[in-house]
Image (cartoon, rainbow, N blue to C red):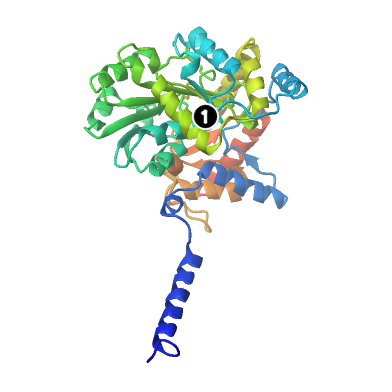
Amino acid sequence: MNQVGGFYPLKRMMYVCSYMLTLEKNPLSDRINSLEESQTIGMSKLSRELSAKGFDVINLSLGEPDFITPDHIREAAKKAIDDGFTFYSPISGFPELRKAISAKFKRENNLDFKPEQIVVSTGAKQAIANIILSLVNPGDEVIIPLPYWVSYIEVVKLAEGKVIPVKSPIESDYKITPEQLEAAITPNTKLFIFSSPCNPTGSVFTRDELKAFADVLAKYPNVYVLSDEIYEHINFLDRHQSIAEFDSIKERVIVVNGLSKSFAMTGWRIGYMGAPKWIADACDKMQGQITSGTCSISQKAAEKALTSDLKPTLEMKEAFRRRRNLVVKLMKEIPGWKINEPKGAFYVFPDVSSYFGKSDGETTIRNATDMCMYLLHKAHVSIVTGEAFGDDHCVRFSYAAADDRLVEAIRRIKEALEKLK
């Protein structure tokens, strides 16, 4: 057949149609297809949908304080608007804010990060992404204690790194040992990421425990440390401890923090890092191509927060301590749930595996995800599956809610669990 009226045009048309069908089926990149949706955000979305149908859902899935941002911080933001701080900000943040963060590091943590070592970002999450994408090459190994915060492993995926999870059970208060850390290190290890106080477990590493980690890491000069300290001020032990305090490794430690948890500023989207200057410069470069500088008004509010008295923050911490005590007491009354006492943050991470295999006649609980969906639909309480954090025997329960709602949530949970046989 000739090319004008026969086989070749038909073949080409079939090829084009097949190509278009392929694009229509899934035109997205492998990068985004490999990325998991945040299950904390996903559960919150499901709870809002159920609420919209008229159900009284108690949403304990998001890590968000229920307090309003303190007055003096809000007033600083209003003044910034009136004073005309409405233009683009420097990529790494206003000099005044970076100086305030530098002073905060020295005053509260005894850390010597100069202003040029500070990068202000649109939330601590962006700071973490900047660091991982700036440091990790394809195939580099990143050690992450398990349970972990949901976004750590997903950002490592984006960087095409390899996650090396290190499990820590409830019996060890969800804390890995120095021996476990050292056993996980190989010639390909690039980064060690952990949080203290920890999301999702509320565990807090003591100074002695951090010193033991530092002693291990001192032997491996090519391994860097990302210390996520966003829950610094929600710490029920003594003064917050940072692994960046130890001279043997401080030149390889990047500290991430922010204002969302300690100052009830989740919606302001303001986080920051202190890092060796060459890493800070790399993150400035990365951020300059993605978002540039963060919101100018949020930065002026953050400057006020970091240079003012911590009384409102400490009052919030005491409220969280009271709620922790309340929730742990009530949860210990739930048959089969295994509880540890969190030492910080505002989460409890109970092991619920004793209910696996049980059923109410309609729903069978096979794993933690089933447990969460069962409690959402039968008790109208929204919590997050531990699978999202690397432990499918557990669920994450946030107690960043009013006392009466916490009491009611646990009452509903107990009532729903009594139906499982």
Q: Is residue 213 above or below residue 187?
A: above
Q: How many marks?
A: 1
- Could you say which is closer to the camera, residue 339 or residue 279? 279
Q: Is residue 371 above or below residue 211?
A: below
Residue behind mark 1: 124
Name the quadrant of the N terminus. bottom left
What's the amino acid at mark 1?
Answer: Ala
Other residues around mark 1 within 10 Å, as few (<14) / some (14–19) / many (≥20):
many
Residue 154 at x, y percent in the picture: 43, 42
- Could you say which is closer to the camera, residue 113 or residue 269? 113
Residue 248 at x, y percent in the picture: 30, 13
Which quadrant holds residue 218? Answer: top left
Q: Residue at x 65, y 36 (%)?
A: 408
Q: Furthest residue to the right?
A: 82
Q: Secondary structure at mark 1?
A: helix
Residue 102 at x, y percent in the picture: 51, 13
Q: Residue at x 45, y 42 (%)?
A: 388
Q: Residue at x 31, y 17 (%)?
A: 214
Which quadrant holds residue 145? Answer: top left
- Could you say which is closer to the camera, residue 123 or residue 53? 123
